[in-house]
């Protein structure tokens, strides 16, 4: 991210909106917005390093980590969306530390994103770098582009999910049951 270009662009946006960017409340706004976007869009690269630290595990039962909170930025309106992710996977002789799943969610949510792609990115990363028998990712989020503008449907949530690998129907049902 070119921080100076963002600062300049936000200043120009304030001008275009008819604001006096020299007034007290707006003096540092371009810098603050640049700092915020640097944080919002800090997720770069892949989850390879995050998911590389694994532990041997002979059991093959499902592992579920749920209620992983996230916030992201919608690429359509540059507005936030936020919610929770659940990751369920069936290990194949190895498991990953639970914090690594949450870090994977953070990595992929901290970029311009669509909820559908976020769900898919997480599932693909777990399959590629952890190599489980199967994975299921469920994402539920509230989009401020739906609540603060346009149709203004406060409290509406969108749920997306995807499955990769061998993840039998009865395991899928278990995941949805546990998420209720």
Image (spheres, grey):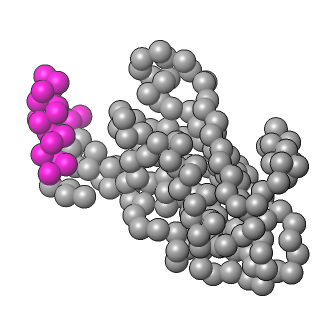
User: Is residue 141 left or right of 174 when viewed as pictured?
Assistant: left
Quadrant of res 15: top left
User: Is residue 172 left or right of 9 when viewed as pictured?
Assistant: right
Which residue occupies the foreground of this view, 28 or 18?
18
**Residue name at image x 19 percent, y 58 percent:** 2
Vertical side of 93 occupied by 104: above or below: above
Vertical side of 170 occupied by 155: above or below: above
Vertical side of 81 occupied by 102: above or below: below
**Residue 8 seen in render:** yes
**Residue name at image x 78 percent, y 57 percent:** 167
**Residue name at image x 49 percent, y 17 percent:** 152
Question: On the rendered image, what quadrant is the N terminus found in?
Answer: bottom left
Question: On the rendered image, what quadrant is the C terminus found in?
Answer: top right
> What is the x, y in percent for residue 35?
30, 53
User: Is residue 34 left or right of 27 when viewed as pictured?
Assistant: right
Which residue occupies the foreground of this view, 82 or 29?
82
**Residue 103 seen in render:** no
Quadrant of res 153: top right
What is the chief secondary structure element of the magenta stretch? helix
Q: Is residue 19 magenta?
A: yes
> What is the x, y in percent for residue 98?
70, 68
**Residue name at image x 34 percent, y 49 percent:** 36
> What is the x, y in percent for residue 81?
49, 38
Region rendered in magenta: 5-26
Which residue occupies the foreground of this view, 165 or 44?
165
> What is the x, y in percent for residue 124?
57, 60
């Amino acid at each position: 991210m070119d921080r100076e270009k963002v600062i300049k662009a936000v200043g120009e946006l304030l001008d275009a909106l008819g604001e006096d960017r020299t007034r007290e409340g707006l003096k540092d706004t371009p810098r603050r917005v640049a700092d915020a976007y640097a944080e919002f869009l800090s997720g770069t690269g892949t989850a390879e390093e995050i998911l590389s630290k694994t532990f041997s595990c002979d059991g093959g039962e499902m592992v579920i980590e749920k209620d992983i909170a996230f916030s992201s930025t919608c690429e359509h309106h540059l507005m936030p969306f936020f919610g929770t992710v659940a990751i369920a996977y069936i290990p194949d002789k190895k498991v990953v530390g639970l914090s690594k799943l949450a870090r994977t969610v953070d990595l992929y949510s901290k970029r311009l994103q669509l909820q559908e792609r976020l769900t898919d990115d997480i599932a693909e990363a777990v399959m590629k770098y952890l190599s489980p028998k199967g994975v299921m990712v469920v994402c539920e989020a509230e989009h401020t582009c739906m609540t603060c503008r346009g149709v203004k449907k406060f409290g509406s949530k969108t749920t997306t999910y995807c499955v990769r690998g061998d993840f039998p129907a009865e395991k899928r049902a278990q995941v949805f049951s546990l998420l209720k």
